[in-house]
Amino acid sequence: MELPRNIVIGHDALLAVGEVCQALKLGKKALIVADENTIKIAGKTVEKELTGRKIRHSEYLIPDATWEEVRDGEERIRKGDFEFAIGVGGGRSIDVAKCASFNAGVPFVSVPTAASHDGVVSSRASIQKDGEKVSIGAQTPIAVIMDTGVIAESPFRLLASGCGDIISNLAAVKDWALARNLRNEYFSSYAAALSELAARLVIENAPTIKPRLEESAWFVCKALVSSGVAMSIAGSSRPASGSEHKFSHALDRIAKKPGLHGEQCGVGTIMMMYLHSGNWQEVRDALLAIGAPTTARALGVTDDEIVQALVHAHEINKE
């Protein structure tokens, strides 16, 4: 079981980066992975805090999260003798930092600037490889630092997407229980309960999750952490990734203009909960209250693309 050793959520949490890295004795040299926007939003503050703790650092600005960036980041870590990596961003930077540090055998710290999906806390990474997005197993961050002030100021669509990703845990746990019953697959009741708790937290607070409200960012961040910890306890993505995620990944391949990951997972959850004879209306109503898509039109894809994604979803990550 691999869990983050330090999690900081709150206003001005960025100011704790240096202290956390020093307390965990991660080393005296860090590679900061970010993009041109996130280095300005949070990266410079991270650098200032590291300097204050006499931790040397270098920037690695990436245009996208591709396998080429991962290999380049890994090479930079090895050649530069970096002792740990810090991913600063909404997803791409963190995924590259996660994979590059894992390949190089050093720890990494996750500093999300948006709460758009649970990848900011988990060991999984979404990377472009050979022309398509693939989900890669890497390592859980040794520390997670989520500044609710920064996250509240990010585009609200990203926060709403994060809500969709968390709510999708309901369908994922039902799929996991089905796999236990049909294939005798390992099932952790504790991980499943924690995953469902995260989804319930978002559903119950859906009417209060609004743009530029730091309390909303706090709810979502807390739920994302719970979701990530559930996966760590299970030793797999099962508690937070099921048929609704396969649908989303299939839609990424098929749709001309796919939506955000969490948005697609939210729509997928409505359908999968219906197939499980679950309370799909509750899922739909929560997503509507938050302002997340619930239909193909709202998602920006065609009905045919939805159907094709459902038809081909079983081909994703075949076991």
Image (tube, grey):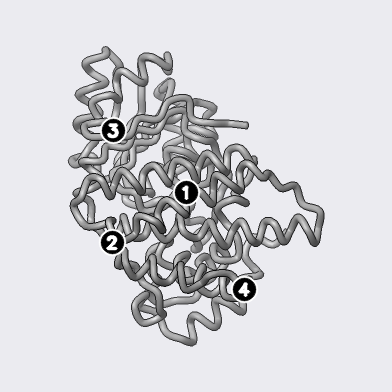
Furthest residue toward bottom: 304
Q: Which residue matches tag 1?
A: 198
The Cα–Cα distance between marks 3 and 2, rounded to whole angstroms, is 28 Å
Amino acid type of the residue tagged 1 in the rendering: Ala
Classify mark 4: helix, strand or loop: loop
The Cα–Cα distance between marks 1 and 4, rounded to whole angstroms, is 21 Å
Left or right: 141, with 192 as reference point: left
Mark closer to the chain start, 4 or 3: 3
Q: State how many labels appear.
A: 4
Mark closer to the chain start, 4 or 2: 2
Q: Which residue matches tag 3?
A: 59
Q: Which residue matches tag 4?
A: 277
Amino acid type of the residue tagged 4 in the rendering: Ser
Q: Which residue matches tag 2?
A: 157
Q: Where is 68 relative to 284, above or below?
A: above
Q: Position of residue 227 (x, y in %)?
A: 50, 46
